[in-house]
Image (spheres, helix red, strand yellow):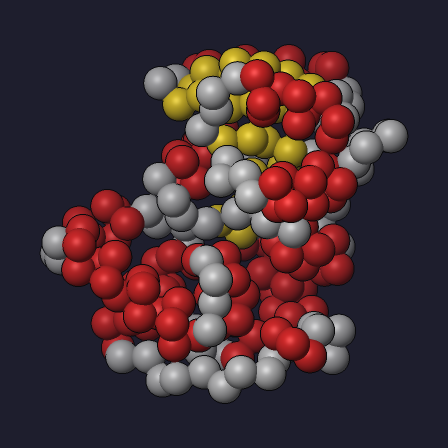
Amino acid sequence: MTRVIVVDDQALVREGIRALLQVAGIDVVAEADDGKTALAAIAEHPVDVVLMDLRMPRFDGLWALEQLHAQGSQVPVLVLTTFDDDELVLQALRSGARGYLLKDVTVDQLARAVRALEAGGTLISPSITEGLLRAIRSDRVPARERAAPIQALTDRETDVLRMLAEGYSTREIAELLHLAEGTVKNHISMILQKLGARDRTSAVLRALREGVLG
């Protein structure tokens, strides 16, 4: 069973998320009410995905993301928040978040996002994509992220990248495109190389910024 930690400063919200995820067959192994207690919970419990709110008193979600990133943590973090501010989205993604959802999602959408991240994918709420595009194409993007030119992707690589942006896992992409998983992994490696990206999230962000995905 998929194991998650829920991080939110409101106990009622945590209880509600726990109940909804249990219905979807996802086990909440721990809860935390701020970024510091989240780090302690992650260190104590084996976990597949962390659901992280951003705006919390004392140590917030961005602080926790930065700490996890500095530690080299591989635990995927799905931001689940009410805030859709462009800068906040970018800050969270640059700090290592692998997904960003608003709290108005359905149970099915939340469960799918959790499983997508568990499988190595990424997922950004469609409702914030337009604002995200404006932000990452603006001058607010650090120059170092615009410096290296990108190489043209093949049609197949573009297909794979688009599916990564939609949150599909390697296995799901392989099934939908009728390819071997190893072939999809090779395509992803080439995508990262051509876009000068360190991981899938960075690749999707740069592709959006450069207009590779339209």
Compared across the picture, whether 192 is left or right of 44 comes to left
Q: Measured from the top left, where is residue 45 in percent x and y?
A: 53, 17
Q: Measured from the top left, where is residue 122 in percent x and y?
A: 46, 49
In the rendered image, which quarter is residue 48 located in? top left
Q: Measured from the top left, where is residue 124 in percent x and y?
A: 53, 51
Classify 43 as above or below 123.
above
Classify 212 as above or below 129.
below
Furthest toward the right, the residue is: 58
Give the residue at x 61% y 74%.
145
**Can you say which quadrant of the picture contains the N terminus?**
top left
Give the residue at x 18% y 51%.
181
Give the residue at x 25% y 57%.
185
Classify 105 as above or below 83.
above
Q: Nearer the viewer, residue 32 or 102?
A: 32
**Can you say which quadrant of the picture contains the C terminus?**
bottom left
In the rendered image, which quarter is residue 157 located in? bottom left
Q: Measured from the top left, where is residue 21 in percent x and y?
A: 49, 20
Q: Nearer the viewer, residue 71 or 133?
A: 71
Q: Nearer the viewer, residue 128 or 39?
A: 39
Total count of labels:
0
Give the residue at x 72% y 15%.
12
- Does residue 5 appear in the picture of this structure? yes
- Does residue 110 appear in the picture of this structure? no
